Image: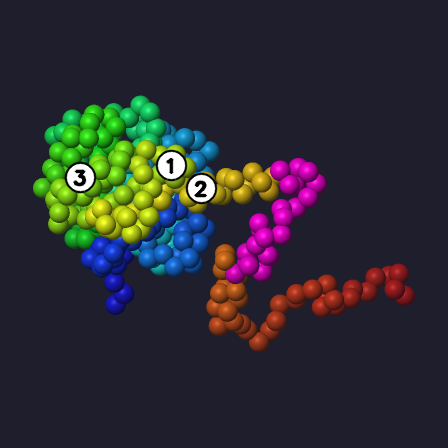
Amino acid sequence: MAESPAKALRRILDSPGVHLGPACFDALSAKLVERAGFDYCFTSGFSISAARLGLPDVGLISFGEMMDQGRQIIQAVSIPIIADGDNGYGNAMNVKRTIREAIRAGYAGIFLEDQISPKACGHTRGRKVVPRDEAVMRIKAAIDARKESGSDIVIIARTDSRQAVSFDESLWRSQAFADVGADVLLIDALASREEMKAFCKIAPSVPKMANLLEGGGKTPILNPTELEDVGFKIAAYPLSLMGVSIRAMQNALTSIKGGQIPSHGSIPTFEEIKEIVGFNSYYEEEKRYATSTDHVSSQNDVPSIRTRSDG
């Protein structure tokens, strides 16, 4: 029997070193992550909101839309996927439903934050967090929902209190999350290497996650060796795929507007595109169901029809 997605993710967390995880936003980007050889993948609420709605990550995308997108992503790949659970979409009871639906969808893990509703992207302005007791109860509710479901989904407890309140507050909340059973801890928008080191020293038995926002986020972008030395177990790169996709599309549109196609090397060949999206594997599987009678495949195979003018 194949191991569950959650068990596969726990095996990664138990293995040596730091494990890098790009963030996908749809089935195709997830397939590219898997083809590149990564062991797991995150979903990015920021990127999903942008790709699916063309809107900013400010709480406009719904629970149902995020779950629908997640199911499509999970069905496209075999590697474990970690969900962006935002703030659980409400109070502790909403969090429990979020966890149950994430389990049904097939997620390996999910991270939950302590922001109020509507939430804000982690490295943007305007973030506010719920009181300490409510933040802790959200994580407790997630743990309870997991137990009640008989699942082993990985619960990643995230606090946004570093920017909303203080660094000390974020350390307190992280320790409290560990005390109620969180599997992984994340303080978003840590502002220095020193803060990253201090974070990794609390609850030493609980793995730490780094959220490395590319292109101008608040957290220093450390290389994998540095991340491991500091004490991180997993690291997310939330905007790389979305960011390069935007730039590539802008460049392609500029070329087309100028009467040219994108330059050689900036676009895959048609054969490469077909391979990536699965045409070749589809054709191979299709052969298993071939019949002795071939379908008409071209105009040359169509018998001629005599008309009165034919004599």
Q: Quadrant of the C terminus?
A: bottom right
Amino acid type shown at disc 2 = Met
Closer to the camera: disc 3 or disc 1? Answer: 3
Q: Are marks 2 and 1 in contact (CB under 8 Å)?
A: yes
Q: Position of residue 140 (x, y in %)?
A: 13, 40
Amino acid type shown at disc 1 = Phe
Q: Read off the residue under disc 3.
A: 198
Callout 1: helix, strand or loop? helix
Q: Where is residue 262 in the image (x, y as percent from the top left)?
A: 62, 46
Q: How crowded is mark 1: few (under 14 residues within 10 Å), some or many (20 or more)?
A: many
What is the C-alpha distance between the residues marked 3 and 1? 27 Å
Q: Residues within 10 Å of mark 2 (few under 14, many from 20)?
A: many
What is the C-alpha distance between the residues marked 2 and 1? 9 Å
Q: Does label 3 or label 1 sit earlier along the sequence?
A: 1
Q: Where is residue 24 in the image (x, y as percent from the top left)?
A: 39, 46
Range shown magenta: 254-275
Q: Does label 2 or label 1 sit earlier along the sequence?
A: 1
Q: Where is residue 198 in the image (x, y as percent from the top left)?
A: 17, 39
Q: Quadrant of the N terminus?
A: bottom left
Residue pushed farthest top?
A: 126
